[in-house]
Amino acid sequence: MVGLLLIVGAIALGVVCLHSEEARTARRIQRMQVERVTIRRELWSVQLTIARYKTPQRIGGEVHRCTLAVTAPDAPRPDQADDVRCVTAR
Protein backbone atom coordinates (compact mmCIF):
# COMPACT_ATOMS: atom_id res chain seq x y z
CA MET A 1 0.00 0.00 0.00
CA VAL A 2 2.82 2.43 0.88
CA GLY A 3 4.60 1.53 -2.36
CA LEU A 4 1.47 2.30 -4.37
CA LEU A 5 1.10 5.63 -2.56
CA LEU A 6 4.74 6.49 -3.39
CA ILE A 7 4.22 5.62 -7.05
CA VAL A 8 1.07 7.77 -7.28
CA GLY A 9 2.90 10.64 -5.52
CA ALA A 10 5.85 10.36 -7.90
CA ILE A 11 3.52 10.38 -10.91
CA ALA A 12 1.67 13.43 -9.54
CA LEU A 13 4.98 15.22 -8.95
CA GLY A 14 6.09 14.36 -12.48
CA VAL A 15 2.83 15.69 -13.94
CA VAL A 16 3.24 18.95 -12.00
CA CYS A 17 6.83 19.32 -13.23
CA LEU A 18 5.82 18.63 -16.83
CA HIS A 19 2.97 21.14 -16.60
CA SER A 20 5.35 23.76 -15.22
CA GLU A 21 7.83 23.13 -18.03
CA GLU A 22 5.03 23.30 -20.59
CA ALA A 23 3.90 26.69 -19.25
CA ARG A 24 7.49 27.99 -19.28
CA THR A 25 7.96 26.81 -22.86
CA ALA A 26 4.66 28.40 -23.94
CA ARG A 27 5.82 31.75 -22.50
CA ARG A 28 9.14 31.48 -24.36
CA ILE A 29 7.32 30.71 -27.61
CA GLN A 30 5.05 33.71 -27.11
CA ARG A 31 8.03 36.01 -26.42
CA MET A 32 9.80 34.70 -29.53
CA GLN A 33 6.71 35.30 -31.66
CA VAL A 34 6.49 38.89 -30.43
CA GLU A 35 10.20 39.33 -31.13
CA ARG A 36 9.73 37.87 -34.62
CA VAL A 37 6.95 40.37 -35.37
CA THR A 38 9.13 43.24 -34.10
CA ILE A 39 12.11 42.11 -36.19
CA ARG A 40 9.91 41.66 -39.26
CA ARG A 41 8.53 45.20 -38.77
CA GLU A 42 12.07 46.59 -38.52
CA LEU A 43 13.06 44.66 -41.66
CA TRP A 44 10.14 46.13 -43.61
CA SER A 45 11.08 49.61 -42.42
CA VAL A 46 14.69 49.16 -43.55
CA GLN A 47 13.59 47.71 -46.90
CA LEU A 48 11.29 50.70 -47.42
CA THR A 49 14.12 53.10 -46.62
CA ILE A 50 16.41 51.32 -49.09
CA ALA A 51 13.69 51.43 -51.75
CA ARG A 52 13.31 55.18 -51.22
CA TYR A 53 17.05 55.70 -51.63
CA LYS A 54 17.12 53.66 -54.84
CA THR A 55 14.48 55.66 -56.74
CA PRO A 56 15.78 57.55 -59.79
CA GLN A 57 14.39 60.80 -58.41
CA ARG A 58 16.29 60.38 -55.15
CA ILE A 59 19.53 59.45 -56.91
CA GLY A 60 19.15 62.41 -59.28
CA GLY A 61 18.43 64.69 -56.35
CA GLU A 62 21.52 63.51 -54.52
CA VAL A 63 23.66 63.99 -57.63
CA HIS A 64 22.26 67.50 -58.03
CA ARG A 65 22.66 68.25 -54.31
CA CYS A 66 26.27 67.15 -54.33
CA THR A 67 26.80 68.98 -57.64
CA LEU A 68 28.47 66.01 -59.20
CA ALA A 69 29.20 66.39 -62.89
CA VAL A 70 28.91 63.32 -65.06
CA THR A 71 31.65 63.32 -67.69
CA ALA A 72 33.11 60.83 -70.09
CA PRO A 73 35.85 58.61 -68.59
CA ASP A 74 38.54 60.06 -70.87
CA ALA A 75 37.51 63.73 -70.39
CA PRO A 76 39.72 65.91 -68.20
CA ARG A 77 38.40 66.58 -64.73
CA PRO A 78 36.88 70.06 -64.23
CA ASP A 79 39.63 71.06 -61.80
CA GLN A 80 42.27 70.08 -64.40
CA ALA A 81 40.63 71.57 -67.49
CA ASP A 82 43.07 74.51 -67.64
CA ASP A 83 46.09 72.33 -66.96
CA VAL A 84 47.82 71.67 -70.27
CA ARG A 85 49.93 68.83 -68.88
CA CYS A 86 46.77 66.94 -68.00
CA VAL A 87 45.39 67.18 -71.54
CA THR A 88 48.67 66.43 -73.37
CA ALA A 89 49.64 63.51 -71.14
CA ARG A 90 46.83 61.41 -72.54
Image (cartoon, rainbow, N blue to C red):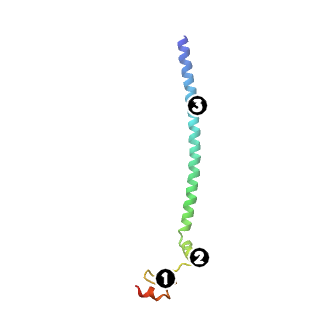
Q: Quadrant of the N terminus?
A: top right
The percent position of residue 53, horizontal first and vertical second, equals 55, 67
The percent position of residue 78, horizontal first and vertical second, equals 51, 84
Q: Is residue 82 above or below residue 45?
A: below
Residue at 57% x, 46% y: name it: 33
Find out whether the residues at labels 1 and 3 contact each other: C-beta distance under 8 Å: no
| Foreground: disc 1 or disc 3 | 1
Return the mark for residue 64.
none
On the image, numbered disc 3 is attached to which residue?
20
Give the structural element (helix, strand or loop) at label 3. Answer: helix
Q: Specify which label sits upstream in the sequence, 1 or 3.
A: 3
On the image, numbered disc 2 is attached to which residue?
65
Q: CA distance from mark 1 to mark 3?
A: 73 Å
Q: Residues within 10 Å of mark 3 (few under 14, many from 20)?
A: few
Q: Is residue 10 above or below residue 76?
A: above
Give the structural element (helix, strand or loop) at label 1. Answer: loop
Kindly identify the amino acid type of the residue bearing the numbered disc 2. Answer: Arg
The percent position of residue 77, horizontal first and vertical second, equals 49, 82
Give the structural element (helix, strand or loop) at label 2. Answer: helix
On the image, numbered disc 1 is attached to which residue?
77
Q: CA distance from mark 2 to mark 3?
A: 62 Å
Q: Is residue 67 above or below residue 47?
A: below
Residue at 50% x, 80% y: name it: 70
Pick out the residue farthest to the top.
1
Kindly identify the amino acid type of the residue bearing the numbered disc 3. Answer: Ser
